[in-house]
Structure formats: structure tokens, C-alpha cells
Image (spheres, rainbow, N blue to C red):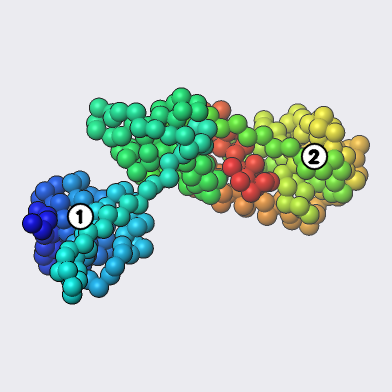
Amino acid sequence: MEYEPKVIKANILKESIEYDLFPSLDNIRSISLEDCKKIYALPKTIMEFKNLDEIDLTGSGVTEAPEWLKKMGGVVKCMMRYNDSKSKKRYYERMKTNIGLKCPYCHRDTIVRNGKKSNGTQNYLCNACLKQFISDHERTYMGTIPWLASLVKIMLVRGIGIRDISTILKISAKKVLKILISSHYKIKPKKKHYDTLEVDEFWTYVGNKKNKIWLIYAYDRETGEIVAYVWGKRDLKTASKLRKRLKRLGITYNQIASDEWNSFLTAFKEDKLLIGKKNTVGIEGNNCRLRHRIRRAFRKTCCFSKKLKNHWKAFDMAFFYINYGFV
């Protein structure tokens, strides 16, 4: 007796395509390849069918699963029906698409199944580090995905605010802040000696615009590198702090380029000075870049830090990204 699978066809009606309606998706066990293509073109994919395990390839003219279907992952039973002129038998082929799992902690592939979570998702155990985890495609909350932190950091240093990231990635604002606060980025000078260092001040604020926090830093125009920086008030004490930091880092230079601000002239009076805006074109251009890269530094922005620590963390990350090109 020939095997007759119980097939419930998924008839994708015109209304279903127009209005994105999928009645009784959980009851669909088998679907035709043509209907599968229609669903795959829509926002919802075949992975939305919880109980689907067969795809009917009758009359499709294909002998194996197409590439777009293989990329969908999971285990799909492709039912291939065709007639043999001699035996008149039906043949069935089971196609498995395996998702390669690696431990998110030690990145090894010594993975075994370890029961299921309370919500029904498959739990895995790494035999190397003995830590448990679930695969990314079974996660219901984006905030638990391991690679999310690197994506959030890139967005932070490309001028996207905390709440914008929360909306785009569908995670909580607290999660974004946690990633920012837990970051530890410090820049180190790439060279010990520079020909000309440009110095300038940069205005920011924390909490409200009356609470001004000034950034004073040194910049190398040739390499586009932020060499050193300090925070404080716009006064001689902060300017002198920058010179002391350069000396403490063991950095030497031939000359300092600055504007006509008296604090710079006094703090760097022992060094050779190039005074005038024409000598600080590089650092002025970098100030513009900072205004575009750090949301807290935008002109007329409503995005600002409530805590000084978060403010420093955001700038530390941006400076690291400018110097090294990654976070």
C-alpha cells in the first residue's frame, strides 16, 4: 500500500497577500512550493508556521530544495512526488538544513541539547565551558542576543541617540545605557613624537545648558588622531592639565598650534607656538566631526547626559572609534 501523507494545503488567497492575513497557520503541516514562494516574499516567512514539516514539490519541476529555502534554516521535509515510468512508485526525500551552533561564551562547537525552557524553546549545553544557552533564532527578546552590544556601540558612535537605538532594535533604553556604562575605552598615542599638535576647546553640557563641561584636547592633523584630552572648566587650570598629561604620556612635539586664547598662550608658553585660526584648521574640522558623530554634542539637540560618568563614557567610545576605526 502506497504511503499517502496527510496534507493540508496552504491556499494563499488574494486577500491574504493584500492584507497580510494568515488564518490557522498553526494547523498547516504541508504547503506547496508555489505558495511557499508567495509567503517568503511577504514580511512573514515559513518560520512563522509552527507545525510545518513538509513542502510539496509536485509539478514544480525541481529535484532538490532551492537555495532560498535552504537559507531559511530549521528542518524541512521536502516531499518530492514524481512518477517512474517503470515502477510507478512515489519517492520522498528528506532534506535537512543544519544550523551550525557555537557556544557564545567559548566559541566551540561541542554542543548538546539540554532540555527545554519553560516557554518551550530548546536549551543547549556546551561540554567545554559547561554553560547553557539558547540559539539566536529562538530568542524572543533582541536584548539577549550576544552580538547586540557591538551593534549598539557602532550606532552610538555614528550619531544615533539612546531612545532611537531602543526603537530601531526593539530593546529597552536601559539595555542601551547598560552597554554604554559597561564599556571601557581609553585611547593611547600611536607615536611618541609629533611634529605639530593642534589644541582647542570644545563645549558640551550635562543635565542642562547652564552646567557646561569643557573638553580640551590635542589633535594631530597628519594622522587624524586625538592624542590626549582632559575635562574641566574653560580656564588656565584645564589648559595646563592638558600639557601635563602630554608630558606624563611621554609625548614630545616640535610645536603647538592654537588660537589666541590667553590660557593656551600661558599654558604652552615654554613651547614653540603657532598662533592663529589658519594653524588650527585640522582640529576645527575634527570639532565638526564630533558634532556629527556624538549625539550629545549635536547642535540644538534634546539628547544629553544626565550623569557626568555617562557623558565621559560616550566621548571615550567615540574617540576610540575615531582613532582605531572600531569599537
Q: Earlier in the sequence, mark 2 or mark 1?
A: 1
Residue at 61% in and 46% down: 326
Can residue 136 be seen here?
Answer: yes
Residue with the most extreme bottom position: 85
Per the image, the residue denoted by label 2 is: 264
Relative depth, front residue between 214 and 325: 325
Q: Which percent across, then down, holds residue 187? A: 70, 37
Q: Which percent across, then down, holds residue 247? A: 84, 32
- Vertical placement of residue 78 versus 203, above or below: below
Residue at 20% in and 46% down: 50
Tag 2: amino acid: Phe
- Vertical placement of residue 193 versus 110, above or below: below
In the rendered view, does 300 fall on the left or right side of 246? left
In the rendered view, does 295 fall on the left or right side of 85? right
For label 2, the crowd category at 10 Å Cα-Cα, with few meaning under 14, some 14 to 19 and many 20 or more, is: many
Relative depth, front residue between 286 and 232: 286
- Quadrant showing the C terminus: top right
Per the image, the residue denoted by label 1 is: 54
Relative depth, front residue between 47 and 220: 47
Q: Nearer the viewer, mark 2 or mark 1?
A: 1
In the rendered view, does 320 fall on the left or right side of 136? right
Relative depth, front residue between 72 and 162: 72
Q: Which percent across, then down, holds residue 246? A: 81, 35
Q: Helix, strand or loop at disc 1?
A: strand
Q: Helix, strand or loop at disc 2?
A: helix
Tag 1: amino acid: Glu
Residue at 76% in and 52% down: 223
Q: Quadrant of residue 135?
A: top left
Q: Quadrant of residue 193?
A: top right
- Quadrant showing the N terminus: bottom left
